[in-house]
Amino acid sequence: MTLKINSKAPAFISTSTSKNNYSLNDSIGKYVVLYFYPKDNTPGCTLETKDFNKLLSSFKKLNCEVYGISKDNLESHNKFRDKYNIKFDLLADEELKLLKKYKVWGKKKFMGREFMGTIRTTYLIDKKGKILKVWENVKVNDHAKEVLETLKNITK
């Protein structure tokens, strides 16, 4: 069960690949994409991150910041960022605080096994910090493009 549309996005401060801690309050006045993904350097997560990276200038033109969040540590994030020349910040949530706050930590099934993990989810947040749209159980192909198209329609 994800957070509700039009509800206030939970505030947080997180360690970030930009060497500064990032606070959601830093982005008031801008749109924000928070995409939660399971793991650095895995096929789906790499594809999703590269797609957001490719479209970053289009997001920026619409006054929107993009942040990728996973439970990987900063060292892993930095390697991932450098390997693919990612131009936006990745946020580290090793203690699962954000994942739980945003209700994206839950039961997953893979090859008949059940385990706890990150449910691939994207939140689009407006300039006042309210949730505009939620994508649950994201399929990575063309996902970044779909988020961008949604933002374009909202900002028209």
Image: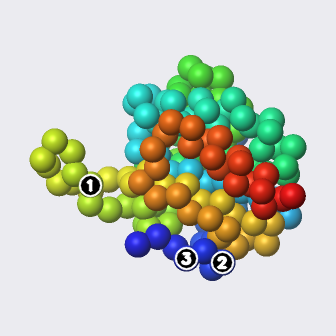
Observer able to see residue 93: no
Residue that carries the numbered disc 3 in the rendered image: 4
Q: Are marks 3 and 2 in contact (CB under 8 Å)?
A: yes
Looking at the image, tell me whether mark 1 or mark 3 is earlier in sequence order.
3
Looking at the image, tell me whether mark 1 or mark 2 is earlier in sequence order.
2
Quadrant holding the C terminus? bottom right
Q: Amino acid at mark 1?
A: Lys
Q: Position of residue 100 (x, y in %)?
A: 43, 66
Q: Position of residue 45 (x, y in %)?
A: 47, 36
Observer able to see residue 37: yes
Provide the secondary structure element on which disc 3 rests: loop
Residue drawn 51% across and 30% down?
Answer: 47
Q: Amino acid at mark 2?
A: Asn
CA separation in Å, label 1 and label 3? 21 Å
The circle on residue 95 is none
Residue drawn 56% across and 43% down?
Answer: 143
CA separation in Å, label 3 and label 2? 6 Å
The circle on residue 6 is 2
Quadrant holding the N terminus? bottom left
Provide the secondary structure element on which disc 1 rests: strand
Q: Position of residue 147 (x, y in %)?
A: 65, 49
The circle on residue 108 is 1
